[in-house]
Image (cartoon, rainbow, N blue to C red):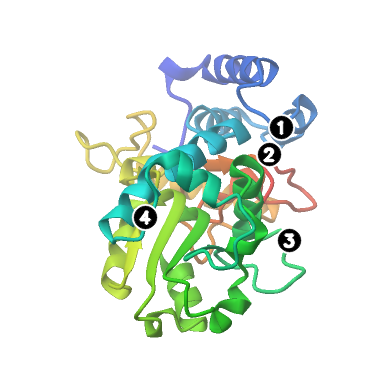
Amino acid sequence: MAFHVPEKNFAQYDEVEERFRVLLKKGVITGIDEDTLDRWLANFRTDEERYFASCVLGRLTFRSKSMIDSSIDHMLHCVLPTDLRRHKLFPYPDIESFLKAIQQNDPLHAVRFVGVDGSKQNDTGKSGVVMIRHYKRRATIHKSITCRPDSLSQLPPHVRCLVFIDDMLGTGKQFEGFAKEHLLAEKKDIHMVYCPLVAFHEGVGNLQKTCPWLTVLPIEVLNDRHKFFFESTNNPGIWAVDDTNTVDDAKGFFDRLATRRGIPKSTRHGLDLLLGFEDATPNNSLSVLWARSDDWSKLLTR
């Protein structure tokens, strides 16, 4: 049977739309207004397309600025200090002293925070640059202990730890290329930590193999069940989202929709996730969320 709306889900579109609008009005989901939502929902014209939209919207994992702030707090108050202590790079009596230290103008500080990508001065839209701004805003990290990627070859000898920050670790290929471009493996006397807000479990495993000198410390880890086209564990081949349609039918329906409407079916690093950040949605997420064309309006900023 071709992709269809299961009888049990006839009312799902209206229910999901109403719930999402409530989240917008209550400020739980930020950075999206109702006009943007209306334009995105208007992309879907048939009953099957609207049902597909409700499946996407109902499974969206969204991280607002307040959620990002919470993740940054957890990283700086707990995850990073624990790792620095383990490597004898924490010369502070307590966490408060560490937090004060990274706010000071101290060029002799042993730690540098680096955004992954954004090597050029005008790369203001890159995720690493966006995350550096978030860290500076939330934790008042001083500019003197941040480092642009294109300055990694000129690090002073007292720097003993590089903390790479990013929003998303997907396949791991992007960081692998970043590491090769900046010859990170050659910096054997420097402890290196990669701290994405969210990571896909396969990407973590890939980096552990290809970059064994790197410590990967994500705040949140996603697994295969976060993929939109994941099959049911109880019914192989059946789409886990509704336990009715097949994975092949759901994927084929999306591929045909994307082709008709001029948006990509996938990307180089696509994982079919439904993950969105208020400022920058990763390209590991399904293009239906962030793509634009003459016949398609985006929901999230890419």
Q: Are marks 3 and 2 in contact (CB under 8 Å)?
A: no
Q: Amino acid at mark 2?
A: Leu
Residue 276 visible in this rendered orientation of the protein:
yes
Question: Residue at left 47%, top 74%?
Answer: 158
Question: Mark 4 touching mark 2, by CB under 8 A?
Answer: no
Residues at marks 3 and 2, CA–CA distance in whole angstroms: 21 Å
Residue, disc 3: 124
| Residue 250 appears anywhere in the view | no
- Mark 3 Cα shell of 10 Å, populated few (<14), some (14-19), many (≥20): few
- Please tell me whether mark 4 or mark 2 is closer to you in this view: 4
Query: Residue placed at 31% from the left, 48% from the top?
Result: 82
Residue 151 image point, x, y percent: 61, 78
Which x, y percent locates residue 2?
A: 44, 39
3D distance between C-alphas at marks 4 and 2: 42 Å
**Front: mark 3 or 1:** 3
Q: Which residue is mark 4?
A: 90
